[in-house]
Image (cartoon, helix red, strand yellow):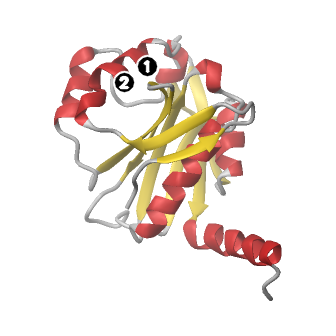
């Protein structure tokens, strides 16, 4: 499964990726306080409410929701989640959500965290990952595309933004088997092994 990993962002900043634990409650609450409301509207919970974060920390269940944190110097700078259902016709699909602190956007953190969720999804036997992205969110679309997601559909005026205006969303899907075939091909070319 997933332990702790270190990586470097585009500007050289070292980031640690690891699963959320109960002791992260206060740091996660503080992280969300620094995120503009218009970026949080895509989430299904009020993450600026302390009780919401307390409940998440208290009832961690990696089988249902796997929260992956990005940390710099002990402070949370990114939160990505992989959501799964155990039964039904979507049991082979994981849903992903990601929030990155404004200071760490455009540095590759979102793509790095999404790549880790794709690897984890592969280990868990999932076949596809699903992301819903605001159509006007160029940074989020770019991060998803860099992590192997493809644009599948636009649903017009489906959701409301923080100003109560209807907005379009883009459905993006990562075919995990294709993602790993592509990564394997890249790896064999670099290693000099025949493909």
Query: Between 9 and 173, which is closer to the camera in this rendering?
Result: 9
Going 54% across and 42% down the picture, which residue do you hit? Answer: 132
Q: Which residue is mark 2?
A: 28
- How many marks overall? 2
Q: Secondary structure at mark 1?
A: helix
Q: What is the x, y in percent for residue 152?
A: 64, 55
Q: Residues within 10 Å of mark 1 (few under 14, many from 20)?
A: many
Q: What is the x, y in percent for residue 133?
A: 58, 38
Q: Secondary structure at mark 2?
A: helix
Q: What is the x, y in percent for residue 151?
A: 68, 52
Q: Which residue is mark 1?
A: 31
Q: Compared to 142, does 92 lie above or below?
A: below
Q: Are marks 1 and 2 in contact (CB under 8 Å)?
A: yes
Going 56% across and 67% down the picture, which residue do you hit? Answer: 176
Q: Is residue 3 left or right of residue 23?
A: right
* Picture quarter with the C terminus: bottom right
Is residue 159 something that shows in the picture? Answer: yes
Going 60% across and 50% down the picture, which residue do you hit? Answer: 172
Q: Residues within 10 Å of mark 2 (few under 14, many from 20)?
A: many
Spatial separation of the CA atoms under disc 1 and disc 2 = 5 Å
Q: Is residue 99 left or right of residue 48?
A: right
Q: Is residue 103 left or right of residue 45?
A: right
Q: Compared to 183, does 151 lie above or below?
A: above
The quadrant holding residue 175 is bottom right
* Picture quarter with the N terminus: bottom left
Going 81% across and 72% down the picture, which residue do you hit? Answer: 190
Q: Is residue 6 left or right of residue 152?
A: left
Query: Between 139 and 163, which is closer to the camera in this rendering?
Result: 139
Residue 121 tag number = none
Q: What is the x, y in percent for residue 85?
A: 30, 57
Is residue 169 something that shows in the picture? Answer: no
């Amino acid at each position: 499964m997933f332990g702790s990993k270190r990586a470097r962002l585009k500007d050289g900043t070292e980031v640690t990726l690891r699963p959320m634990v109960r002791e992260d409650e206060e740091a996660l609450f503080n992280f969300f306080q620094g995120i503009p409301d218009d970026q949080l509207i895509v989430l299904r919970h009020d993450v600026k409410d302390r009780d919401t974060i307390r409940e998440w920390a208290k009832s961690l269940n990696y089988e249902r929701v796997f929260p992956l944190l990005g940390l710099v110097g002990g402070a949370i700078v990114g939160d990505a989640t992989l959501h799964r259902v155990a039964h039904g016709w979507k049991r082979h699909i994981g849903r992903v959500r990601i929030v990155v602190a404004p200071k760490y956007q455009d540095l590759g953190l979102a793509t790095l965290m999404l790549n880790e969720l794709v690897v984890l999804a592969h280990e868990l036997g999932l076949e596809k990952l699903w992301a819903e992205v605001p159509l006007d969110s160029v940074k989020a679309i770019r991060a998803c595309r860099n992590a192997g997601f493809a644009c599948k559909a636009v649903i017009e005026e489906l959701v409301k933004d923080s100003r109560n205006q209807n907005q379009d969303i883009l459905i993006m899907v990562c075919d995990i088997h294709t993602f790993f075939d592509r990564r394997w091909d890249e790896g064999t070319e670099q290693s000099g092994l025949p493909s």
